[in-house]
Amino acid sequence: MPGLHLILQSIPLRNSIEMTEKAPLKSIASFFSSISNLYDRAFGGRLVLRRFASILPVDLVVRASGFILLPLYVHLMPQNEFGLFTYILAVIVSWTVVLNFGMYLAQTRLYHRYEGDERAAALFTIHILVLGFLALVLIFFFASKLDFAIVQVLVSSPISYEAYRMPLFFAVGVSVFSFMLYNFFATSERIKTYQIFSLLKLFVVHGGVLFALILSEGDTVMIRIKYAYILEFILLLPFAVILVKEMKMQFKVAIAKRALAIGLPAAVAALVGFVYNFADRFVLEKFGSLADIAVYNLALTIASVIGIVFSSYQTVYLPLFLKEREVQRNIRNTRALVWKVSLSLGILGAAIFLVAIVALDLNILDEQYNDILIILPMLLVGGIMQSIGHLFTNYFVYFELMARSTIMGVILGAVSLGLNYLLVPSLHLVGTALAYFLSSAVSVGAYAFLVTRMIRKTGVTL
């Protein structure tokens, strides 16, 4: 749910065999390559599996860093401050998807539609749109102070928002352009650059933040926000030069119109998705406490390993899915993927639950977080269902029908919010996890039904 994993960006791979040999965890890559024949048809082809095996080691380490470092952050931050930070971070991640105005999808879709100078102009046009729209929105909120009213709605616990305000504006801007840069490296097949940027971000940002938490005293929420995004901005600058060199400084209205046609419906869908993705924490914060938020977000972070692994596969599967001209072939692959992904992630989910039990038993995680064992099974199964749902939502991008996805998102957001208001006031943490589970089930069922109806015209059914 959180950020829908930023819609799982595309990464076509270049020189996959050589990169597999150089990967830090090449034994894992070799394992996945060795089973490529077994899952050849089920996972969309041997090429997809081979690319997945190449990107998985680094991608898994980077994306799982938040999970791996959890014991350190939990130890260094009071429970209430850990809860507040994870709540704020969820807002930043959600608004990162909204405030790039769907241009990451336009970049993914149009990069392979143009060549030469047209492609270079498209990159410039898309990023000028992002910069312009983002600047207008941030200036509007800063001048009108509308963000104060939004914070009052989102956060019932007393916080000093005035102190957080400018760091949060800065964090949102850095997150948007970092997201666009990741997407560019993925779309343009710069996998080695993507991985270097990811690893540097892992070691520099997390290392710097942990060092600051150890040496500094005071508000740990402010320390994490300030140091994390300053360090990410510093890293962003030299890598952004690679993107700028690919641009032709020419804004093309025709390309802008096409980008907006792809992006704006996705931005509206992301805004609606904010309600769907954030309803659980929003309602829990109203009827519970920041300590409840801390426990719930810790459990969500642990369960997010499901999404991390699936998104690594989706990362290499999606661009090939979008490039495929024969819709029937995509449909056959989707039909095979549904049960294979369910089985694989189910086994992974059981392993994650056992690891959580051991971590609590050995006091790696503090006993004040024991309640995660009550809610974690529901979050793991919900995460599996959401991963399956992404296999169906791929078709909305494929057919450029994001408006339909937006309508569905409105309905599912209302369902999620309703379930949370129904269950959380009386059941608190359990109610939040149960609402997550039920809304995930409704979501995957609804998307499967809608996409199945949508593609029956092709003559092939799921």
Image (cartoon, grey):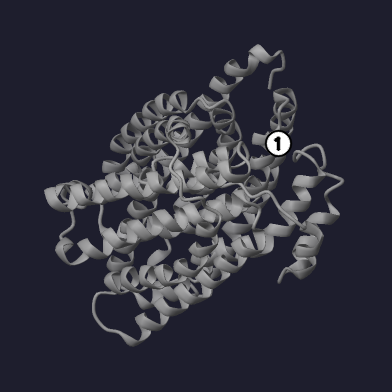
| Residue pictured at 74% horizontal, 52% vertical | 51
The N terminus - image quarter = top left
Q: Which of 168 and 451 is in front in this view?
A: 168
Q: Residue placed at 28% from the left, 68% from the top?
A: 81
Q: In this view, does 27 lie to the left or right of 82?
A: right
User: Quarter holding the C terminus?
Assistant: top right
The spot of residue 181 in percent (x, y) is 50, 56
Q: Is label 1 in a helix, a strand or a loop?
A: helix
Q: Is residue 374 left or right of residue 322?
A: left
User: Percent position (x, y) of residue 68?
Assistant: 53, 69
Q: Which of 289 and 324 is in front in this view?
A: 324
Name the residue tied to disc 1: 337
Residue at the spot x=56%, y=38% of the render?
Answer: 110
Q: Which amino acid does label 1 sit on?
A: Leu
Q: Which residue occupies 13% across, 51% down?
A: 143
The quarter holding residue 16 reads bottom right
Residue 384 in sight in this render? no
